[in-house]
Amino acid sequence: MGVGDGVLSVTTNSSPSGGVVTVSLSHSSQVAKSGISGHRTAPTDGTPSVTSGEMDIRSSAEYNPQKERTGGAGAMRCAVVIGTYNEAENIPSLLPEILRLGDDYGVIIVDDNSPDGTGKLVEAMKADHSRIHVVHRERRLGYGTAYSEGFRVALAMGADYIVQMDADYSHNPRDIPRLVEVAGQADIAIGSRYAEGGRTEGWPLHRRIISRTASRFARFLLGVPLADFTGGFKCFPRGTLESIDLGNVKSRGFASLYEINYMLHRSGKRFQEVPIIFVERRAGQSKLSFKMILEGWSVMLRLRLTGGR
């Protein structure tokens, strides 16, 4: 099924250590569109089972998205994955902006049961927009796990390119086509604040110092040739995500950004940085905390000492 074919609503009861993500198609007709037959016994090789229009996407250690790719001639070209927690002030305007980029673009929201009703807002919006899809999680499970789940869903839906971005307008949705274009010539395109032509706006001095220092330290410590190592605005061709096991990403929070970059670098993937203007969030509260900063430093040290194992 292409990212734009029908409406996908997902509810997950997965635990931090794994579990099952249940992907429920909102209409049985969507099963016929995707080429998935109605009743099928669960396979024994770790691929997702499909029963009466429901797909169980198991832990990434078991799940092989390449086997489940259902995209065909009508498959959507790009799925934009956005993790949300209390983003009700931004989502109503952000999602239409992404959809206006063209029919090649769909959105997958992964919401951690936001107290401000973000998930309910997305549910209401997707009733009128078939290219909006949502993953509902029972509680706050972490930035990194949200994007890993979103990536799996995008791959299963047949997306050719998967964009990772934030919900707070720090990443400009109008930059998405630029990332997709560059990703067609590289293994991963990264929206970069620190490449020539990129910059940040509205950040206090201490945030700029922390971000710059972390990127430079990571480049020195891990040998990854990136000016902006800590950025979360990326575009992956599907083959790049299929080449790594997301179940091996140990970081549950923002440090997953560093870990995935390192995994891709170690596997020989080519990075291309695309200069962007990164602005302070438009509305809502920043999720960055001192604990997350410490986690980032500790993860970089762990990767250096263990080689990512």
Image (cartoon, rainbow, N blue to C red):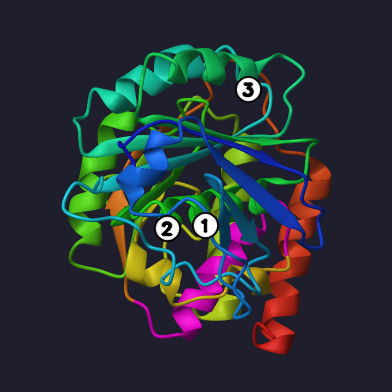
User: In the rendered image, which residue does mark 1 sit on?
Assistant: 152
**Residue at 24% from the left image edge and 49% from the top image edge:** 75
User: In the rendered image, which residue does mark 2 sit on?
Assistant: 155
Residue 289 relative to residue 309: left or right: right
Alpha carbon of mark 1 to alpha carbon of mark 3: how far?
19 Å
Regarding mark 3 in the picture, which secondary structure is present there?
Answer: helix
Residue 228 relative to residue 186: left or right: right
Work out which quarter of the rendered image holds the C terminus and state it: bottom right
Q: Relative to the observer, which residue lies in front, 81 or 122?
A: 122
Instruction: Magenta stretch: give its range.
Output: 251-269
Residue 12 relative to residue 17: left or right: left
**Nearer-N-terminus badge (2/3):** 3
Kind of residue indicated by mark 3 = Gly
Alpha carbon of mark 2 to alpha carbon of mark 3: how far?
22 Å
139, above or below 268, in the image: above
Q: Are marks 1 and 2 in contact (CB under 8 Å)?
A: yes
**Within the magenta stretch, is there residue 259?**
yes
Q: Relative to the observer, which residue lies in front, 210 or 274?
A: 274
Residue at the front extreme of this rendering: 39
Alpha carbon of mark 1 to alpha carbon of mark 2: how far?
5 Å
**Residue at 33% from the left image edge and 54% from the top image edge:** 35
Say whether residue 37 is visible. yes
User: In the rendered image, which residue does mark 3 sit on?
Assistant: 119
Q: Relative to the observer, which residue lies in front, 290 or 255?
A: 255
Q: Position of residue 248 (x, y in %)?
A: 66, 74
